[in-house]
Image: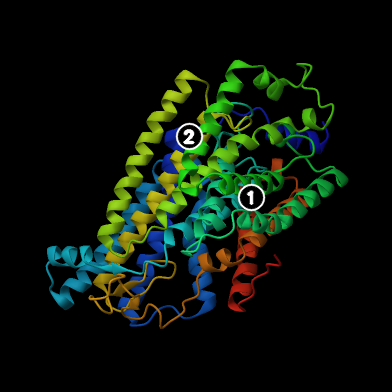
Amino acid sequence: MSQKQLKEAFISNLNGTSLLEISVGLSLAPLCLLCRGLLLILYYLHHGKPVSSRKYSLLLDFLVLVSPLLFSCTILSPIIFFIPVILAAFCAGIFSKIYSQRKREARVPFGQVVKEFQKTYLDPEYIPAITVFRVYVNVLTSISILAVDFPQYPRRYAKAETYGTGVMDLGVGAFIFGNALVCPEVRQKSAVTPPRFSHLARQAFSVWPLISLGVGRLLSVKSIEYHEHTSEYGVHWNFFFTLAFVRLAASLLLAIFPKHKAWLVALALAVFYQLILSTTSLKMFILHGSDGRDSRLGFLDANREGLLSLVGYLAIYLASVQVGQWLLQRRDSVRGWAAALKVLILAVLVLFVLLQLCQACTEPVSRRMANLSFCTWVLAHCLLLLSFFVLTDLALVFSKLLVKGSSVPCCWRIVQPQNSNKKHGMEAVPVGREDKLSQPCLISAINKNQLLFFLLANVMTGAVNILIDTIHSRAALTLCILHLYMFFNCLVMYILHAKNIVLKFW
C-alpha cells in the first residue's frame, strides 16, 4: 500500500466511543479554564497585581488551557475517566488556599460570602460562556485534525465510518452549533425590524471566505494527492462548503419564518429528513451509491454524504439559533444565571432521554447521514459543554469575591447598579480592577481571529503530514510535534491580538 492508502485506511472503518466517555471528556476544558482562573486569583492574592507579562501569560494559558487536552487525547487517554478527578482535586486545593487566606484576613463566615455571591450583579452585555465555547471547539478541532493521524490518538475518538459517536463527529456538529450562537439573527438587538432579507444578504457576502477556503482545500488536496476520507463528505465536498451553505439556507429560512420559532423549523426538518431516510431508499443511496456498489458517478453520487447531510446540519443550526436567542436574554445577576443553568441542565437531560428514544425507534447516531439521532446527540452534548462553562464562570465569580480587586480575563465582570431607580435595569459599573486593566488572554486572542486560526491549523496539519510519517511516530515525537503545532498556532493569534490586528475582509 502507498503512504496515501495507509493513511486513508488508518482513519477508516471506525465505530466511535461511548456517550459517557465523551461526556467525561467534555468536562476537561471547563476544568482547565477554572484552574487557570484560580491560579490568576491566587497570584493576585500573593502579589497584589495581575500577571502583566505577555510572555508569562501566554505560557500559563498554553500550559493550563491547551496542554492538558493534548495529553488527554493521546498518552493519557487510557485513564481519561481519572483526569477530571485529578484536575478537580487540583482546583479544590487552589480554592482552599484562596479561601483560607481570605479567612485569615477578613474572618467573614462562609455563609455570608455565599449570600453576597447570590446578590452579585454581572455585566449583562457579556456572556463569557459563549466566547469560551466557540474558542474551545476551535482548539479541540485543531488538536484532533492533526492528532488523528498519529497512533497515540485513540481510534475510537476519530470519526465513525457509518454509525457511532466519535469525538471528531461531535466536533463537526459543535462547530455548526457555535456558529449559530453568534449569527446575525441572534445578535440583532435593534427594536426596529430590519428588512426581511437583510440578514440573507449579509450572509451571502460573509460566506465567500468559506467558499474560497473550500475551493482552495479541494484544489490543494487533489493536486498533491493528499489522503482523504471520501465517505466523510464525498469526492469534491468538504466542511467549508457545508458551513457556508448551511449559513445561507438558515438565513433564508429565518427570513421566511419567525426567528423565535426556529426550533420548530429545526424539529420539522430533522423529523422529515429522518422519515425519508427510514421509508425510502435514500439511506441506501447515501451508504452505497446509486448502483449499490459505492459508485461515485456524477456530482450528486460523488458527493452524496456532503450534500444530503446538509439537512441535518441545517436543523442543528436552526435549533442553535434558538439557544443563542435564549442565552442573550438579559440576565444581570448570579441568581438569574443560576436559574438559567438549571434550565440548561434540564434541557440536557431531556435531550439525552430523546436520544435514547431516537436510537431505539429509528437508528443509531450517524454523522455520515446527519440523521435525527445525530442532531439530538450534538445538541445534547453542546448544551452540556455550555452548562459546564456557565458553572465554571459562576465558580470564578465566587472566587473573585473572596479576593477583592482580582480579575480573570474572559470571565464575567462583577458590576453594581449605578442607579436602582432606573427603569431599564442595571448599568455596568465595574467593581475593582475588572475594566481598568486589559489582561493578555489566549482565549481572547483566538476569538478575534477564529477563522484564521482554523485555516492555519488546516495548513499546518497538511504540512506536518507531508513532511512526517505520522503513522509510525513514537509517543515522544508525537507529543513534541503536537505541542509545537498548537503553540505556533496560538503564538500567531497572540501576536495578532497584541497588535490589535483582526484579519477579516468581509
Q: Position of residue 392 (x, y in %)?
A: 36, 57
Image-based side of 278 in relation to 68, left or right:
right
Question: Above or below — where is 69 with respect to 395?
Answer: above
Residue in front for this viewpoint, 62 or 324 = 324
Label 2 amino acid? Thr
Residue at 38 percent across and 51 percent down: it is 388
Disc 2 secondary structure class = helix
Task: Rate crowding at label 2 as few (under 14), some (14 to 19) or many (20 or more) other CA atoms within 10 Å.
Answer: many
Counting every numbered tag in the picture gives 2
Q: Quadrant of the N terminus?
A: top right
Disc 1 secondary structure class = helix
Q: Position of residue 177 (x, y in %)?
A: 53, 47
Q: Quadrant of the C terminus?
A: bottom right
Residue at 62 percent across and 52 percent down: it is 142
Pointer 2: what residue?
A: 376
Residue 171 visible, this orientation = yes
Question: Above or below — where is 42 with respect to 375?
Answer: below
- Estimate the spatial distance between the alpha carbons at disc 1 and disc 2, rounded to whole Å: 34 Å
Image-based side of 326 in relation to 280, left or right:
left
Q: Please report whichever mark, 1 or 2, sits nearer to the chain's N-terminal start.
A: 2
Question: Above or below — where is 24 with respect to 303?
Answer: below
Residue in front for this viewpoint, 16 or 412 = 412
Residue in front for this viewpoint, 3 or 501 = 501
- Tag in front: 1 or 2: 2
Pointer 1: what residue?
A: 478
Question: Above or below — where is 291 with respect to 466?
Answer: above
Q: Position of residue 107 (x, y in %)?
A: 12, 74
Residue at 66 percent across and 48 percent down: it is 248
Image-based side of 132 in relation to 451, left or right:
left
> Quadrant location of residue 314?
top right
Q: Position of residue 342 (x, y in %)?
A: 29, 47
